[in-house]
Image (cartoon, rainbow, N blue to C red):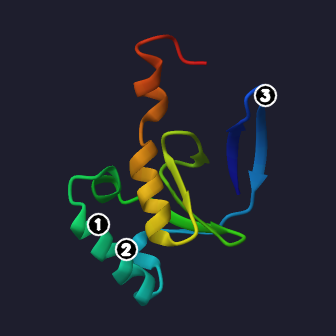
Amino acid sequence: MLLGLFKSKNQSTHVSLSVTSLAIEELPRAIKEDIEEFLENHPGSPAARLRPRMGMVGDIWLAFIGSKLRTGATGLGHTPRDALKDFNRHFMEPIASSNGSEPD
């Protein structure tokens, strides 16, 4: 089970999600091949370097590192590629946006 922290404008909410996650190498062959092609086409991206685990909640794909879903280490999308694109787009976002200020 993963614990995710999701923030709205005025509050933070902890949500427990039951997610089966797999390493990219453990995914079904067609999905793995699609992901590997994406990573080969984006070799310097965070996803290519870190190879996040993949999972699904309902019909949403997750790409994440670590044992918790958290901003800056999670990507969401309707396809595995969309989740990886979102992961790359938001990787380390909390650190970059804090400009050296203390974390929450």
**x and y percentages locating residue 11 in the rendered image:** 78, 28
| Mark nearer the N terminus (2 vs 3) | 3
Q: Tell me which residue sits at (28%, 52%) in the image.
A: 45
Q: What residue type is labelled 3?
A: Gln
Q: Tell me which residue sits at (44%, 82%) in the image.
A: 31
Q: Which amino acid does label 1 sit on?
A: Leu
Q: Do the numbered discs 1 and 2 sit on residues whose CB atoms are within 8 Å?
A: yes
Left or right of residue 57, residue 66 in this image: left
Report the residue marked by disc 3: 11
Residue furthest to the front in view is 9
Report the residue marked by disc 2: 35
How far apart are labels 3 and 1 at the CA level?
Answer: 35 Å
Q: Compared to 12, does 29 lie above or below?
A: below
Report the residue marked by disc 1: 39
Q: Tell me which residue sits at (37%, 80%) in the image.
A: 34
**x and y percentages locating residue 53 in the rendered image:** 48, 62
Of the 4 image quadrants, the one containing the N terminus is bottom right
| Foreground of the two, 21 or 85 | 85
Label 1: few (<14), some or many (≥20) within 10 Å? Answer: some
Residue 104 falls in image quadrant: top right
**x and y percentages locating residue 83 in the rendered image:** 50, 62
Give the structural element (helix, strand or loop) at label 2: helix
User: Which mark identifies residue 90?
Assistant: none
**x and y percentages locating residue 81 in the rendered image:** 43, 69
Left or right of residue 73, residue 59 in this image: right
Q: Tell me which residue sits at (42%, 88%) in the image.
A: 30
| Mark nearer the N terminus (3 vs 1) | 3
